[in-house]
Image (spheres, rainbow, N blue to C red):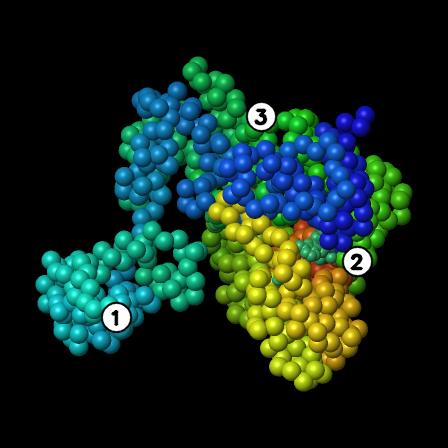
Amino acid sequence: MAQDHIRVTGAREHNLRGVTVEIPKRRLTVVTGVSGSGKSSLVFDTVAAESQRQLNETFTSFVRNRLPRYGRPDVDSIENLSAAIVVDQRRLSGGARSTVGTITDIHALMRLLWSRAGRPAVGPSNALSFNDPQGMCPGCSGLGTVRGVDLDELLDRRLSLNEGAIRFPTFHVGGWMWRTYADSGLFDNDKPLADYTPEEWHALLHGADATVRLTGQGGTVPTKYEGLLERFTRIWLPKDAASLKGRTREAFERVVTERVCPTCDGARLSPRALSCRLGGRTIAECAAMEAEELAEFLRGLEVSDGAPVVASLLAQVERLVAIGLGYLTLDRPTSTLSGGESQRVRMVRHLGSALTDMTYILDEPSVGLHPADVDRLVDMLRELRDKGNTVVVVEHDPDVIAAADHVVDMGPGAGEDGGEVVHQGDVAGLAASGTLTGRCLGNRLRLGAAPREPKGFAEIRGAVRNNLRGVDADFPHGVLTVVTGVAGSGKSTLVHGFLPGVCPDAVLVDQSPIRASRRSSPATYTGVLDPIRALFAAENGVSASLFSPNSEGACGRCDGLGTIYTDLAFMDPMVSLCEECRGRRFTDEALRYRCRGLAIADVFELSAREAVEVFPEPRVGGVLRRLVDVGLGYLPLGQPLNTLSGGERQRLRLADALDRPDRTYVFDEPTTGLHPSDVAGLLALFDRLVEAGGTVVVIEHNLEVIARADWIVDLGPGPGRHGGRVIFQGTPEELLRVPDAVSATARHLRRAVG
Ligand code: ADP
Ligand code: ADP
Ligand code: ZN
Ligand code: ZN
């Protein structure tokens, strides 16, 4: 009996108040509760962290000595813990060589099948891989695209070298790179490039047999001359644009061109691999099919050799379809997937694996899913469970909660008002428990009062991209518009791709990481630290810089971070408390000064709500009050931004934006991370933006938000090539009159309003 539960006793990470829970093994457990109540602290920072720590202890001492010590989570004990796998929403990277096919192992199975049953035979299956020298296209090394240099962008021929003819930051006039040309003695540095002789032109681009002598601090250095084009190609062409910043990235994107590889026409494979066909198709043609089409093709395939491979291949492709990703092609680079899509692709990979008796931990897997897709997600979670795994899901979606074998409800509030288990047991018990979640479960939706009148429309006409084929859509000004449709129907493509074209003032308030986030905190991000430091300085007659965590007052050991980060190549960075200042970030000297009874380190520990009380003056309290309004009142002012969840980051940006509300705000699934009881607060904020003259456009699946829209743009009817059309636009009331067969959104809204 005792063996049948993971038993957590006395968990105290972050806001947890000595939490004790039992998570039944080989069952589906949903952990829910308002945002900030402590779900992640329990599931990720306690259960998953301890599993990872125990796993690290199994490494040899050689490896272990190279891993920083994982802090033991603050918990009395965790019994019966099995190895935990966290399936989160971090986007998949891996560059152009990582595709939906490679990451789910579908591509490996396809290669196996084609190598066994394809004709003419191609030998080992590696010869069918675009990631293997034997199989890759020689023209593009298996990337499918080739890069080139746009010389008209790299060089301004009207100018001379001295005038800055080379238009790229690292070749700026006077710099080392520039001098290898200007000091070469090969050119007249005042002659415009347009006047170069063919020989000079050739020497500039491709080189000359010359050694250049550069005068540096240590005397004259002989350097082998390298032509500009050759050098640029060698240094810059292999770079990943995403790894570059600012001006360099702009210049890179201007100068470096990318086009489909003419040798393989984008198929990535060698001519030999492309000659091999099965059922009339090459492996590349099949990889370019949407998963759903591929499944059809495989079902129709008759092979005598390799039937078991077809069966496992089909099973894995069908999982992609079943989880609502049937619209993805197998050759789609994983770097282009959304967070929710990445997470579901990871799930498919794990479902295909033979591991059992693992603990799978999933973070809000319903993100990006229309209510119509959630049923299939639930099936998949059950499949994972029925393979003998323990499945723990942090989730707010009522349909996922309803499917749980066991529910852990955290609360009652957020931050210090939370950190307790308010209910654990089955779903029926939760509904009867009277907790916030229990009460929300049975709620019927109501449509908003009369929709607000638009102040004109922004009109998108003839949008063509991805699965959109000539879409017209109208986005009203001055109201709340919700863009709906099943996953893959084209919502993001339409909103992100075309709305800025017709609403140039549009700002995206998304969940992407905030840059430089380790150093920043809500205090620095919102700018409240500056007036607070000024208050400290005035009260104590010392310099304000003493109270900045990146100045003289900062602890020298941790640079004012309070924690020590150890970066690892292959894992997340490890964090441990700074022993010098014990997490207080400042020198003892700085900590001696007080303002309103607090030391500067105490201010960093205040939650936004507490801080409003201490610093009510408008230039501090104003922005803090907006933090409270967006539901972040529980957030400590000094919490590093890199520990914020996506939803918290989005709300932080929102609080910042509320300062100047008369624009068009675009949100991508703002209810992510929000409990149903938090959604009302979010809707109130949207109302405030609209009332202040703003326009709000949200991509959203949450039916409560849909019901409260002034205007709905519904895309569909299906995903991928089955979607990409506007099937409805108008008010929620009008949507309710659209038949089930036309719009899945209408069907689900009717059910919820019912
Ligand atoms: P939930 O997952 O329910 O939204 P969390 O477990 O993320 O809640 O957060 C619970 C509380 O702990 C919140 O007040 C949050 O701000 C705080 N918290 C979370 N992570 C950290 C951290 N790394 N350092 C300090 N406080 C944290
Ligand atoms: P939604 O936002 O409704 O989930 P998307 O706009 O993301 O839908 O996707 C619509 C279609 O366009 C899908 O078939 C998707 O696979 C495809 N698509 C989206 N982004 C890309 C991309 N970067 N490359 C290729 N296809 C894409
Ligand atoms: Zn090629
Ligand atoms: Zn320190």
Q: Give whichever of discs 2 and 3 has the lower sequence position.
A: 3
Badge 3 marks a residue whose secondary structure is loop
From the viewer's perspective, is the residue at label 2 or at label 3 nearer? Answer: 2
From the viewer's perspective, is the residue at label 1 or at label 2 nearer? Answer: 1
Q: Is label 2's Cβ within 8 Å of ligand 1?
A: yes
Rendered residue at 50%/58% (across/down): 497
Residue 739 image offset from top left, x and y in percent: 69, 45
Q: Nearer the viewer, residue 701 or 30?
A: 30
- Gap between marks 2 and 3, in whole Å? 42 Å
- Gap between marks 3 and 1, in whole Å? 62 Å
Q: Give whichever of discs 1 and 2 has the lower sequence position.
A: 1
Q: Is residue 397 above or below residue 505?
A: above
What is the three-letter code of the residue carrying label 1? Gln
Q: In which quarter of the view is residue 666 placed?
A: bottom right
Quadrant including the N terminus:
top right
- Where residue 354 is drawn, which disc sits there? 3
What is the three-letter code of the residue carrying label 2? Glu
From the viewer's perspective, is the residue at label 3 or at label 1 nearer? Answer: 1
Q: Give whichever of discs 3 and 1 has the lower sequence position.
A: 1
Q: In which quarter of the view is residue 57 placed?
A: top right
Badge 2 marks a residue whose secondary structure is helix
Report the residue marked by disc 2.
416
Judge left or right: residue 146 versus residue 721.
Answer: left
- Where residue 217 is drawn, which disc sits there? 1
Q: Is residue 395 above or below residue 151?
A: above
